[in-house]
Structure formats: structure tokens, C-alpha cells
């Protein structure tokens, strides 16, 4: 394990030093309980009280929290970001050599940059291109007509360029629609374990620079994802949908096909997106957990809303109060019968 | 790349030709912007205006759209189906040789048809059977007692015949229930990337002819899926459920165990299916996306429905209006306390 | 296939014998239709009527069902558990030899117990530890700093110890937060096909003894799962959440990060868990399936609840009835505008 003096860290990362610059840092730790010889960080104010008891030798923190500091410190405007950069010094995964593992399978006409790493069990199909310093972890499949940019990481079991789910109904059942496009992945993209990105039907599926995809995500054919968008695990995005830049999409969201989501949209976990989102903002949907007996009553009540509305209308009629909710009439059921 | 004259295409697929039969088609393209030398299609009327500006040399279209045709054309009753068939001529994936890749692992007593392809990293366990012209892409696992029919395609990372999730509660924790059945997969089945189909506990899990499964689907032990049913990505189907023929199941649906869904049912994306569906039709559930602040209010209001109902009843009582909603009484909470 | 006399089975498993102890049992079967020479079980009273018609030679059943028994029987307090144990005698998967398949890749400094099995396509990274009698099926990836206990089974395509989804926002886009922790997996844990468990950011992700995980589950960095908890397929658990012991989590649930769920909680399938569950009990959420036309009306009504509430308030005002629902005022929208 490497070790760094506090003075060295302060200088490398342009941070203000509080305390003895000769202190040696040998690793990172959490603020509570902390560990001697290690560096922790304080980003969330609710943990400020832990500053007093931590066993960490150094804490990275914001100027506003300095009053509570009992150990040596490094002062940063964004302590979490500073921590991320310092922690990289201690990351054994950051050291890897380029090459192609003997158990990887590369098609003769695929192009793999000499600075890339292709791990065991990976398969790179004909016509695929793997950029500089890109890393395919293990058992990754890169399909035909897939171009991966530079400095990407593709985690185990990911499938990039699989056949899109294109089907046409024929007289005797489904007929396959050939998927003739590819996938274009930008630079500095992360693709999570067992995540699937299908190749386009005619044009390409596009994943912008700096996009970060967690595990077990499904991205269908001809989807476009803008630069620096981050998507948490278990999200599914249906075909031909366009997602803007710098969006943040929470876990297990489902996004329908052929819609557009503009830049800088935040979608909370488990949202069901059934229409285009044309305005920057924060979005959500779904009913959260209740005790099961209460939940069953909630469902019954929601399914009885038509009856409530009819009773409310009867009361209004009785009182000669006029209600102008056009919507109610449209869906009170009588018109459709 | 192959090339075909328009006259040749019209004759092969039985389509009416509009324009110069000598035009050469070298590939497919989208209608907008289109590409010279390529063939596009118009299926959705909302794109009809693109006929005027397309750079495609030929468009496949329905008789009703002919008036707007500016290029050469092929007239088809179902333009998307005709496109699917023509596009196959240009699909390099359609050309593959049978065989077993040197990096595949086949158990001695597994039976693999001589016309099948078993890609790198695939594992075919003891007793499994792979039918004629079936293709296992890469890193696919075929478990014991799995029979795959003819002309199937199994995409990378799929797991067919994994251990079903069978557990019995013993005095000191969960005990495994052996999963002694297999999986029977019909002909012309597609299984998506990283999709999992578990083997049966006693009898078999059954996937009918022509079933099409997208990526990241979970099919539990002893499920039955009828012929020509198509299931989009991220769907989960719990144990012993029976799904009929020709159903269409949208992405990210969850289907509970031990229920029955009849033939020709359409389930919209993200539906929570908690009971048998005994009538052909279209089904849905779930609350779609709202701006997050409004969504939080929606949740609060739904969880307050009991209170609304009580207030409505108080008004009715005040007015001496009789309401006969038995359901309300059943779940107003007072009876359960 | 092995065969056992009924007397032998009764003695091995401490069960009461009804009928001829010399009957030979060669396998297991379902109660309906059943199969001669095989043993079935009756656990769910709704199948009691099948006792009369079964072709099974022996039925495992509870004392209360004995009156209906027409065949030989084995009487058990918990017939399903007794069946699980007897069925194991007939499970060919129960017989396996330890070793490392020639197509597995083990890092030089990984430690694999001599009684473990590492199947084809598995990759065990540097510093990982695999315990006694643990089985890695095929194409499994075990990352750095992962310790797997004894007698575990890890199914095909599972990824244990992948990079957690740690990102910090930098001035020019996302920067990676190194994931320096590992994963500690207890004894007798099952990990389903294509399930992903990420390694911790600083500390470890912890999976307790006897935990059972189905397929396609996502477990994020620094999650803790208590002993004997069982989780069905397609569940996602976000980072740093702590789940207690002996919980049962249904399929496709989504559990947010940084919350705590106590011991012995049961969460029904597809529940959206957005807050800590501090009391043992059964929990659910979500709106179940309706015919699609009715579902669309339900959504419209739910999104119109604010209007209903306003109309109800107008009626109350008209009648001079005082309502004290503070919540309504808080979210009637006027305050936020």
C-alpha cells in the first residue's frame, strides 16, 4: 500500500492544510469509527457530530465545519469530490496493464486499441472497435458494429450490441426485423454488470460521453442518451427514446419508447415515464409502501373513486352547487357504456 | 454487400412495383433523411409527410399512401412486414455457419444438432438437447434437462435451466427444495440477453413455439408460456403461472405466481398483475409520472382517501342522503381496530 | 436412478409410515396426476381432493389429511419440508465433485478451498476467498476483496464484487469514487443467476448466513442483509441500506438507499420501499391490474383528487361543517404557488 504525507496531499489536490503536514496517510476510512493513519471525509452535515470522536488521522471537510475539527484536516469546497480524488491514490483497481486475456475471443476484423484491456471470457465480434485505455472486465459481449470510445469501463456480464427486439407480425407468427444498426458509445462511459444495450434497427443506439450506467439496465434499440447522464440500476428504456444530457435517473424507472426527455431532468427512483418530459425539473410517480392491510384498503379506495365522485355529485346536486369538472363527466363510465 | 434490382425485390416478395425496375438497392435506411441507393418504409401515417423529402431511392408503402410517393416504391399490404423480409437480405447476422466454438463447453452426454451454432463461452450441461439450426450467441448457460427446439436464437448471457427458487422453512433456516424438472423450449423461440428461465421443480417449465423474449426477463420454475407470445424486457413472472398464446406483455411487468392468463391478452408496460386474467383484452396499472412536488401531493391525497370518505359520509348524514357503498364500511378502519 | 423402500424413507426422516413398507420409491412426482413408483406430497389443503385420484405410490401428508389417504403414506408435521429432504435423494445435482474447471480463471493469490467447485467461465479475482464445499456454477465473476463462505451456491452469470456506482460531480462531469471495500458472504448462501452484488465503497457489503437470493437481483454497495433473509427475483436494493434477519422480500420490490428494515419483515411483491420499516409486519404498495380503459380512468381520477377535495370543502363550507384536515391545506396547491 502506498503512503502519502498530508503536506503532499494538500499540494497535489490544492487543498488547505490544517495540522501537521508530516502526518502519513496510508488509506481511507469512514468518519465513524475511523481508523488511525487513514483519511475520512465529512460531506453531509448530519454527520458533523462524528468529527469529535473519529479515530481517523485526517478529515477532508468544508470551511463551515472547521470549528468542530479535532484532528488534522484538509479543507475543500467539495469534500466528497476531494475525497474521490484522494481515494484513487489507494485504489488497487486503478493499476492495470493493457492487453487481451488469453481467454478472450476477438474477431479477426475487430479493432482493439493497444492500450485497452480485454478480460477473460470477453467476446468482441466482427467489426467492433474498442478505444484507448478502455477496460472490458470479464465475460462482456461486444456485438457487431459497436464502437466503444476511450477510457470506458465495461463491467462483467454486460452485453453491448445485442439484437434489438424488432418483430413484425406475419401470417403465421412473429417474423424478425433484422437489426442492422450498431451502438456508438462515447468516451469515459461506465456500463454496469449485466447491463444490456441493444444495437439499432437501422441507425445506431447512441450513448454520449461521460454517461454512467449502473447494473442490470436495459437500453433498447435506437435509444439516445446525452452526455454526462447517470442512470441507476434496474432501469428499462424502450426503443427510440431520446434522453438529454446531465439527467439523473433513479433506480428501477421504466421509460416508454419513442419519447423525448430534455437535458437536466431528474427522475426519482421507480418512476413510470409514459410521456415526453419537455421541462427541466424533478419527476416522480408511484405509491410508496404501507402496512399491507392499509395498502389493500388504499387500493380498494382508489378503485372506488368513481363511486366517491358520483356521491359527491349527488350531494352537490342536492345543494344546487354547480361543479364544472369536465373531466368527471368524461370518465364517469356512463358515456362509454 | 449484396445488391438487388427493384424488379427482383418486387418479384421475390410479391409486391407491386412503382417506378423503374432497374433501380439497384444496396441497403436499408430510415425514411428521414433516407439514403440514396437504399430502401425505406412507411408504416405509421404520422410520418407520411416525410415521403416528399426522403433521399431513399425506394419506399415500401401501403396503397393508401401512394398519392404522396415521390420516389420509386413497392406497394405492400403490410409495409413493416415487407420491410422486415427485404431487410433480411442485407443482414450479415443472417449468415452463420454451424459448429461449436473452441471456447464452448459441451457435456459429453448433451446432444447438439449438427446444424446448430454454439458460441464462445457457452456451457451446455449434461442431458441438454439443442435443436437444428439453433444459435447460442455467447456465454449462454444451458442447464441439465433443458431441451431447446429448432431455429431458436439465444442471446449472450442468457441462463436457461437455472435452479428454481425452491425453499422450505426448516427448524434452523431455509432448506433447498431440489429442482428436478427441466425446461422445454419450442421452435423459433428467441431468448434475450441475460434473460433467466428456471427449470421446473418437479415437472418442466414450458416455452411454446415462436415465443419471443426480450432481455433481462425472469421466468420462474414451472411457468408455461403459450405459442407466439412476445414479452418485452425486464418482466418478471413468478412460479407456476400459465400464460396463453399470442399474448403481448409490455416491459417491466410483474406477474405473480400460480395464476392463469388466457390467450390474446395485451398487458401494457409496467403492469402489476396480481390475479388471473380470464378475458382477452388490454390491461394496465400504475400511476404515471408527475412533477415531483405534485407527485408527493398525489401520494398524500391517496393515503388520505379514508378521511375524504368519512367527510363525504358526514355530509351525506347531515343531508339525510343514504349511501349504500358497502365497501366503505368494510374498510373504514373502525371494524379492524 | 436410486430407489428406496418406504420403510427406509420413514426411518431416515423420522416419519410415520402408513401402508406397505416394502414399496419401492424411484422418484418424485406431483400429486395430480402422479406417477407409479413415485412419491408426491400434499401441503396446501386446496389440493386435498387430489388424494383420491393420484397415481403416486406414496404421499407425504399431514396428520389432519390422513382420512382421505388412498395410497401408502408418510405422515409429517411439515409435509413440504419432508418432501424437500426426501427429494434430495433423487437430485442428480446434489452429486458433484470439487475442483476447478479447466476453463475457469483463478487469480494467483485468490484462495479456493479444495472442496469447492469452480465451473467453466468463472473468474475469481485477486484476493478473493472461496469457502469449503461452495459451488460456482458457470460464468460467475468474483471480484477483488470478496469472501464467500462455506456451502454456498452461486448460479450462472452472477457478479459478486462489481464496482459500486460511486460518482462525485466534478467541474467537467462525473468523477469516479473508488470502491475500496469488498463483499463478505456468509455460509449457505444462494446467489441467483445474473444477480449482481456490488463491493463496498469503504467498508464491505455484507450478506448474512443462509441468505437466499433469486435471479436478476441488484444489491448496491455497502448494503447489509441479515441471516436467513430470502429475496425473490428482480429486486433492487440501493446503497447502504440495512435489511434485518429472516425477512422475506417479494419479487421486483425496489428498496431505497440508506434506510433500515428490521428483522422478520415481509414485503409483498413489487413494493416501493422509500422509508425505514421499523416494525415487524407485512408491507405492500402499488396499484394492481385493471382493464386498460378502466385503468386510464383510475389514473385520471387520482390526478384529480385535489379537485375532489376542493369540491368537498366547498360543500362543507356551504353546510357550515368544519373540517380539521390540516393535511389538505398543506397540499391544496395555493400555498405553494
Image (spheres, coloured by chain):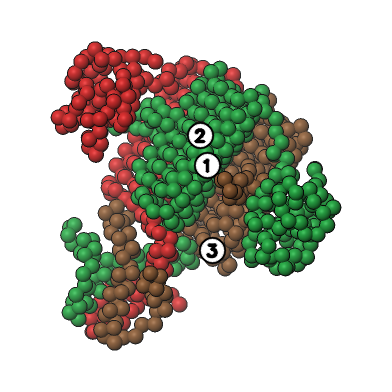
Chain colours: A red, B brown, C green
Image point (26%, 80%), residue name? B315
Measured in 3D between alpha carbons, the distance from the residue under mark 1 to the one under mark 3, in whole angstroms, is: 29 Å
Chain ID, mark 1: C
Q: Nearer the viewer, residue B308 or B235?
A: B308
Q: Are marks 2 and 3 on the same chain?
A: no
Q: Identify the element where label 2 is drawn.
A: strand
Indicate which disc, 2 or 1, sits on the residue closer to the N terminus.
2
Q: Nearer the viewer, residue B162 or B4?
A: B162
Q: Which residue is mark 1?
A: C211
Tell me, yes or no, whether the two marked residues, 2 and 1, touch with CB atoms within 8 Å.
yes
> In the rendered image, is residue A37 in sight?
yes
Q: Which residue is mark 2?
A: C185
Measured in 3D between alpha carbons, the distance from the residue under mark 2 to the one under mark 3, in whole angstroms, is: 36 Å
Seen from this angle, which residue lies furthest top?
A22
Place of residue B180 in the rendered image (x, y in percent of width and height, measured from the top left): 70, 46
Place of residue A120 in the rendered image (x, y in percent of width and height, measured from the top left): 56, 24
Q: Which residue is mark 3?
A: B275
Q: Nearer the viewer, mark 1 or mark 3?
A: 1
Chain ID, mark 2: C
Measured in 3D between alpha carbons, the distance from the residue under mark 2 to the one under mark 1, in whole angstroms, is: 9 Å
Place of residue A24 in the rendered image (x, y in percent of width and height, measured from the top left): 29, 15
* Placement of the C terminus of chain C among the 4 image quadrants: bottom left
Amino acid at each position: 500500500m502506498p503512503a502519502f504525507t498530508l503536506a503532499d496531499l494538500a499540494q497535489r489536490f490544492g487543498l488547505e492544510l490544517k495540522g501537521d503536514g508530516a502526518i502519513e496517510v496510508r488509506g481511507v476510512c469512514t468518519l465513524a469509527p475511523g481508523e488511525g493513519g487513514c483519511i475520512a471525509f465529512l460531506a453531509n452535515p448530519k454527520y458533523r457530530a462524528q468529527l469529535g470522536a473519529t479515530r481517523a488521522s485526517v478529515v477532508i471537510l468544508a470551511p463551515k465545519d472547521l470549528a468542530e475539527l479535532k484532528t488534522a484536516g484538509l479543507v475543500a469546497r467539495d469534500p466528497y469530490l476531494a475525497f474521490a480524488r484522494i481515494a484513487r491514490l489507494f485504489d488497487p483497481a486503478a493499476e492495470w496493464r493493457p492487453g487481451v486475456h488469453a481467454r478472450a475471443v476477438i474477431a479477426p476484423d475487430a479493432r482493439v486499441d493497444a492500450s485497452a484491456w480485454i478480460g477473460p471470457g470477453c467476446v468482441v465480434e466482427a467489426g467492433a472497435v474498442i478505444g484507448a485505455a478502455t477496460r472490458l472486465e470479464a465475460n462482456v459481449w461486444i456485438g457487431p458494429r459497436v464502437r466503444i470510445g476511450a477510457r470506458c469501463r465495461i463491467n462483467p456480464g454486460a452485453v453491448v450490441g445485442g439484437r434489438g427486439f424488432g418483430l413484425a407480425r406475419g401470417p403465421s407468427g412473429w417474423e424478425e426485423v433484422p437489426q442492422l444498426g450498431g451502438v456508438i458509445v462515447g468516451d469515459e462511459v461506465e456500463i454496469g454488470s449485466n447491463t444490456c444495450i441493444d444495437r439499432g434497427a437501422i441507425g445506431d443506439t447512441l450513448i454520449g460521453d461521460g454517461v454512467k450506467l449502473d447494473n442490470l439496465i436495459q437500453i433498447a434499440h435506437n435509444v439516445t442518451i446525452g452526455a454526462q447522464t447517470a442512470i441507476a440500476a434496474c432501469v428499462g428504456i424502450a426503443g427510440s427514446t431520446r434522453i438529454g444530457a446531465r439527467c439523473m435517473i433513479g433506480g428501477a424507472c421504466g421509460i416508454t419508447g419513442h419519447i423525448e426527455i430534455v437535458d437536466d431532468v431528474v427522475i426519482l427512483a421507480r418512476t413510470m415515464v409514459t410521456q415526453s418530459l419537455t421541462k427541466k425539473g424533478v419527476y416522480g410517480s408511484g405509491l410508496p409502501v404501507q402496512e399491507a392491510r392499509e395498502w389493500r384498503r388504499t387500493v380498494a379506495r382508489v378503485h372506488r373513486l368513481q363511486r366517491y365522485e358520483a356521491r359527491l355529485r349527488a350531494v352537490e346536486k342536492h345543494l344546487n352547487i354547480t361543479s364544472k369538472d369536465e373531466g368527471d363527466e368524461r370518465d364517469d363510465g356512463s358515456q362509454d357504456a
